[in-house]
Amino acid sequence: MADIRNISLPIASIEYDNSNEALTRRTLEQAIADLNNKIITVQKMQSPVTSKASKKHQFLLMGMKHG
């Protein structure tokens, strides 16, 4: 999860601006979608099937000679 980035929202103008609202809405929707994807990834990593497969893969890599 090293690709975490900060997104600043546009500052609201005194008068209503439709494009500013659309940009803010799209930014929030994208941030929520990114969080949802990360949650799904973590849930998949914690599932027993994936956990066993990743442990087996790590075990097999431990026996390899590097270099």
Image (tube, rainbow, N blue to C red):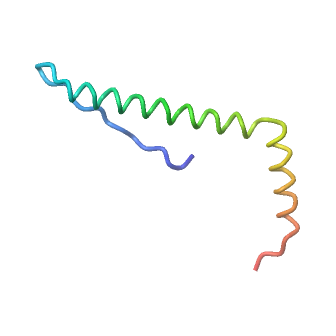
Spot occupied by residue 51 in the image (x, y as percentages of width and height): 81, 43
Dividing the picture into quarters, in which one does residue 37 lie? top right
Q: What count of labels does the image hold? A: 0
Dividing the picture into quarters, in which one does residue 31 lie? top left
Q: Residue at x 72, y 37 (%)?
A: 44
| Residue sticking out furthest to the bottom | 67
Q: Which residue is drawn at 79% across and 35% down?
A: 47
Q: Is residue 36 left or right of residue 54?
A: left
Dividing the picture into quarters, in which one does residue 61 lie? bottom right
Residues 2 and 25: in front is 25
Q: In which quarter of the image is the C terminus?
A: bottom right
- With respect to residue 16, does 66 lie above or below? below
| Residue sticking out furthest to the left | 15
Q: In this view, does 30 lie to the left or right of 43?
A: left
Spot occupied by residue 6 in the image (x, y as percentages of width and height): 39, 40
Spot occupied by residue 5 in the image (x, y as percentages of width and height): 43, 44
Q: Residue at x 36, y 33 (%)?
A: 27
Q: Which residue is drawn at 54% across and 49% down?
A: 2
